[in-house]
Image (cartoon, grey):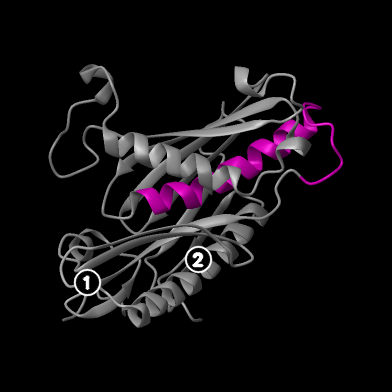
Amino acid sequence: MSRSDGRANDQLRPISFHRGWLEQAEGSCLVEFGRTRVLCAASVSEGVPRFRKDSGLGWVTAEYAMLPRATNTRSDRESIKGRPGGRTQEISRLVGRSMRAIIDAKALGEISVTVDCDVLQADGGTRTAAITGAYVALADAISWAKQSGLVLATAPVLTDSVAAVSVGVVAGQERLDLHYDDDSVAETDMNVVMTGNGRFVEVQGTAEGEPFDHQQLERLLALASKGCADLAKMQVAALSSNNGVSSSGSKGASA
């Protein structure tokens, strides 16, 4: 069974980072994983939540949301409903944890960074795209805070990079970076968050059909590791780009 978008099983979708997409935000990035598009904006503010006050430690958090027409049919805004749904809260916390995994809170000092991730268009993998783009926005926001004198420490604030990708089993085949047509029929679906040096931040895996064994889990994690390593390279290229835009065509994760 071939993939509907023509990719090989170990191929990422075409990935693009558009830094500085918002003029007002201290850091921003429009990230595209194929047809999935997420706008990430990192906002810096002085002070920290009450539980961190006078600790000398900074704070990074995140909020995730989907626009009403990000999918094939319109969904109501959660602000109209009065509260975010469980999925929205879960992904918001995941993005926040992922960013805090690579922050030196002491070097950041008592300032806060909030990363807003808004899904403009969804074709699977919105949480992994959000994490990957959020890091780029966060890195630019930290650079802005240093240049503005809000961060005084000489030690690096960012201890590593962080990226995420999905893997799964579809029709018995292990696949990387699931788009909607893969995800909707996957027998196993897994989201993997990793640092640039290859350490795991979070692994979310579920067997929707046939349970998976240790050997298959190891193969899926190896596939995700290769995908995250490629994403880390793309993040570096994006942050090094003079025009703020970096794109990569679909390619094998082992390339």
The N terminus lies in which quarter of the figure?
A: bottom left
* Residue 49 appears in the figure: no
- Asked if residue 157 is positioned above or below residue 182 in the image, the reply reads above
What type is the residue that disc 2 sits on?
A: Cys
Residue 13 coordinates in the image, percent (x, y): 37, 66
Observer-side mark, 2 or 1, equals 1
Residue 201 coordinates in the image, percent (x, y): 52, 56
* Residue 203 appears in the figure: yes
Q: Is residue 157 magenta?
A: no
Question: Few, some or many C-alpha atoms within 10 Å of disc 2 (few <14, some 14-19, many ≥20)?
Answer: many
Res 209 quadrant in image: bottom left
Q: Residue at x 74, y 43 (%)?
A: 157
Q: In the image, which disc is placed on residue 114?
A: none
Q: Residue at x 47, y 49 (%)?
A: 131
Question: Few, some or many C-alpha atoms within 10 Å of disc 1 (few <14, some 14-19, many ≥20)?
Answer: few
Residue 153 coordinates in the image, percent (x, y): 84, 36
Which secondary structure type mostly characterizes the magenta part of the structure? Answer: helix
Residue 8 coordinates in the image, percent (x, y): 31, 80
Disc 2 from disc 1: Cα separation: 24 Å
Q: Is residue 143 magenta?
A: yes
Q: In the image, which disc is placed on residue 211?
A: 1
Q: Residue at x 78, y 46 (%)?
A: 156
What type is the residue that disc 1 sits on?
A: Pro
- Over which residues does the magenta segment extend? 127-156
Q: In the image, which disc is placed on residue 228?
A: 2
Could you tell me which secondary element the residue under label 1 belongs to?
A: loop
Looking at the image, is mark 2 or mark 1 earlier in the sequence? 1
Q: Residue at x 20, y 43 (%)?
A: 71
